[in-house]
Amino acid sequence: MRDKIIQQVVNKIQARSDVGFKKYGVTLYDDDQGLDTWLNHLQEELMDAVNYIEKARMSLREEIEECYILENKIKEVSSNLESLKDIEVTDPKLISSYPEPEYWTTNYSNETKTK
């Protein structure tokens, strides 16, 4: 099929038909329920659809709210980092230095002495 989206929909309809046949033992074509029954089925399906739409809208609103909260946290952290770049440390006790040689996994000072 030239359109992958249409093919996916067709596949889902076929799979849904298989489920219905397995559950009810009859194809939709051969099911001879009355018009009122079919309208009732349709009404129930549409009510379910409205519920699904409402749930999806609620989930979307929650995700958007989470994004805004995250965005504000990122802005706050960025602002804090920006303010830290102007700090000048002059106290030698606060300035980090390389650790003492016994902390290194390779003792480069011995290599330098032997060369």
Image: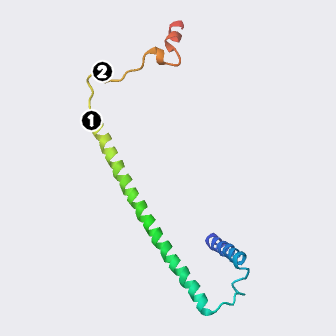
Q: Position of residue 16 (x, y in %)?
A: 66, 74
Q: Position of residue 46 (x, y in %)?
A: 52, 81
Q: Taking 31 as reference, is 64 left or right?
A: left
Q: Nearer the viewer, mark 2 or mark 1?
A: 2
Label 1 sits on a secondary structure element that is loop
| Point 64% across, 92% down: residue | 34
Q: Dot 1: few (<14), some (14–19), or many (≥20) neighbours within 10 Å? A: few
Q: Which residue is mark 2?
A: 93
Distance from Cα at disc 2 to Cα at disc 1 = 19 Å
Q: Position of residue 60 (x, y in %)?
A: 44, 65
Q: Is residue 104 above or below residue 52?
A: above
* Amino acid type at mark 2: Lys
Residue sitting nearer the eye, 70 or 114: 70
Q: Position of residue 94 (x, y in %)?
A: 30, 24
Q: Earlier in the sequence, mark 2 or mark 1?
A: 1
Q: Taking 97 as reference, is 44 left or right?
A: right
Q: Quadrant of the C terminus?
A: top right
| Point 49% across, 12% down: residue | 109
Q: How many marks overall?
A: 2
> Where, by quadrant of the figure, is residue 81 drawn?
top left
Q: Residue furthest bottom?
A: 35
Q: Is residue 10 above or below residue 108?
A: below
Q: Dot 2: few (<14), some (14–19), or many (≥20) neighbours within 10 Å? A: few
Q: Taking 98 as reference, is 49 left or right?
A: right
Which label number is shown at residue 86? 1
Q: Quadrant of the N terminus?
A: bottom right
Q: Is residue 71 above or below residue 32?
A: above
* Amino acid type at mark 1: Asp
Q: Taking 87 as reference, is 71 left or right?
A: right
Label 2 sits on a secondary structure element that is loop
Residue sitting nearer the eye, 22 or 100: 22
Q: Would residue 66 be seen by someone viewing this image from the given angle?
A: yes
